[in-house]
Image (tube, rainbow, N blue to C red):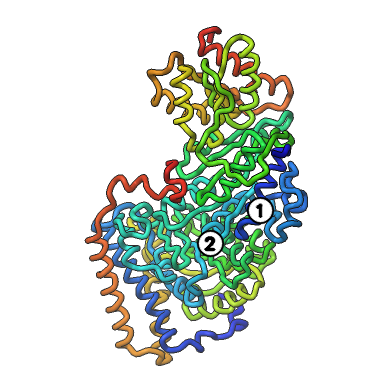
Amino acid sequence: MGVRIKEFPNAFLELTSQGKKELLRTMIRIRSFETRVEELFLAKRIPGFVHLYIGEEAIAAGIMANLRKNDWITSTHRGHGHALAKGAQMTRMMAELYGKRSGYCKGKGGSMHIADFSVGMLGANGVVGGGFTIAVGAGMTAWMKKTDQVAICFFGDGASNRGTFHEALNMAAIWKLPVLFINENNLYASTTPASYGVAVSRISDRAAGYGIDGYTVDGNNVVEVYNVSHTLIDRLRSGKGPILLECRTYRVKGHYVGDPEKYRTREEVKNQAEENDPIKRYTSYLLEHSFIQPEEIDLLWKEAKEEVEAAVRYAEEDPYPEPDEAIQDLFSSDQEVLV
Amino acid sequence: MSIISFSEATLQAMIEEMERDSTVFVMGEDIARQGGIFGQFKGLPDRFPGRVLDTPISETAIIGSALGAALTGLRPVADMHFADFISVAYDELVNQIAKNRYMFGGQADIPLVVRAPDGIVPGAAAQHSQSVEGWLMNIPGLILVSPSSPATAKGLLKSAIRSNNPVIFFEHKLLYPQKGEVPDKEYLTPLGKAEVRRAGKDVTIATYSIMVQKALEAAQTLSREGIEVEIIDLLTIKPFDLETIVTSVRKTHRCIVAHEGVVHGGAGAEIAAQIQQEAFFHLDAPILRVGTKNVPIPFSPPLLEYVAPKVADIEKAVKQVLYREEN
């Protein structure tokens, strides 16, 4: 990918075998969840529309392994993976996808609006590029309260063309805020190729416009994502200011479930899914270096499947909200009387 | 009681609230080095170093980062320079701030205030003169307030900062230098409550911001002609205090709504609709609205004079609902 990857220490090697396994577990949990969500959507169990993170799991897993519970993230419409990796509960997320009462948003948000403030997940966002400035605000809190918390803003190649990108990066840069802007460049903004819609070949080059560092890594290599973000997040904690990290990846599924995908060939998708799958790549790497045993991998898939099925049962059995709950939660209780 | 300006009253509110709560901070363009373009932040940065932040000209990031800060434990006050520029941060206000709490099932409070200097200043023309509450009336999740005097400015700003909900604080630019009595003891002006500024038996005038003064001026002239108007200063535009208005209308049976914003689709449309819904059988005349004509604010003095709502417009509307003047 051309990143000067050698300047980053190989922190991965210092992970315990449990730590190395956790990266894989996170990726497998996300993949299993998303695969099941696709089935449930097609079976009309889940209403609305869903945007799947399949093929991009290494980014959420690699970044979040370097975060603490009280660090913050802002997410996107393709946010299930971010939520799971940050520590959100699968059951409550599934219930939200179903529009059920014990879902994260009590049925008011759905797939595009998962948030779990208790683990620092400040929300997915239905507006592309909506998270930039929110992440800057979280960074301001760390800055003003003088803590070493960091804010991570996930965004896509499409969002890098929003004006919010410009204002947020500039503001974070002038105040040296601890914000890591993670570009998940999955090569398509909805149906528009990044090669057409983005004027630079590397989104990380845009960092120069704000006087901050920008890097591009192979976002389907979880070891690389882990290592680079490990160093970058340490830099944020020491108050050196924001950084832009582009993670090159590939959106294996359509923009949404049901996307006719007329903008790319089946062959391209097939090649990527077979040759560049982040889970396959990491699994091979772990086996090659004997960091894990094949039966442990099987067990991870089995456990994830069980966890997903438990979440489905939970969501299926959970009641819908009462209709008049639709007028609750607009205001904090001190003003509820005014609604 | 002390006599201070509207501008000083807002400054006192800021000082008191920033002293009371260390998580309160303020950011905006030209507020620290300059002290605010209307002097409304003068001296504040020296008193609270690091908590009065000059921002780049980035309204989107100002409002959006205020949300991020509010979600993570601070109580931001974001200054918009001119209310007109809210449009630059419209998505942040409308799709992010207003919806965050509801859309995520009530997980987080949003304790933030947007200060929005609004209203007609002669010569400021189309993009620096608007009253934009109408843009936000249609958005569930925002509280809109607009003081009319130094005392209400101070009390409402303090309440807005203490509220755990997003409050847009519209402050009329021509009010800044005006002086008035402000209580010496600490007080809060409650959100959502109107105040009766003048008692009268003939016509109710529901109004807010600078138009309260114009209504009071009109009241003097009308009184000489034997017409006694009751003036209700809404203070909170959304959610407005319907009960106080309706109580008055049950007595007067006639009502006009006056604001400086454009009449068409303005806040007055909603206020009038709710009054007639609640008090239709008490009304002896249609509710009339007074406001700016349906064009942008023009530059040249005679053009502005023609477009902007005046004391005479209020007098005329009052006489119309009394059937003393043709429509």
CA separation in Å, label 1 and label 2 = 16 Å
- Work out whether B1 lies above or below B300: below
Q: Is the C terminus of chain A in the top left, top right, bottom left or bottom right quadrant?
A: top left
- Work out whether B287 lies above or below B54: above
Which residue sits at x=76%, y=57%? B46
Quarter of the figure with residue B167: top right
Quarter of the figure with residue A204: bottom right
Which residue sits at x=58%, y=49%? B161
Most extreme residue toward the bottom, as rendered?
A290
| Residue B72, numbered circle | 2
Q: Give the left or right position of residue B308, taking residue B325 as reference.
A: right
- In the image, residue A38 lies at what x, y percent? 30, 62
Q: Which amino acid does label 1 sit on?
A: Met
Alpha-carbon neighbours of circle 1 within 10 Å: few (<14), some, or many (≥20)?
many
Secondary element type, mark 1: strand
Q: Which amino acid does label 2 sit on?
A: Thr
Please give the chain letter of the residue carrying mark 1: B
Which residue sits at x=68%, y=43%? B184
- In the image, residue A43 lies at what x, y percent? 23, 58
Q: Can residue A260 be seen in this view?
A: no
In this rendered view, identify the residue nearer to me: B158 or A24: B158
- Residue identified by numbered label 1: B27
- Are marks 1 and 2 in one subunit? yes
- Work out whether A318 lies above or below B9: below
| Residue B1, numbered circle | none
Quarter of the figure with residue B155: top right
Q: Can residue A35 be seen in this view?
A: yes
Secondary element type, mark 2: loop
The mark nearer the N terminus, 1 or 2, is 1
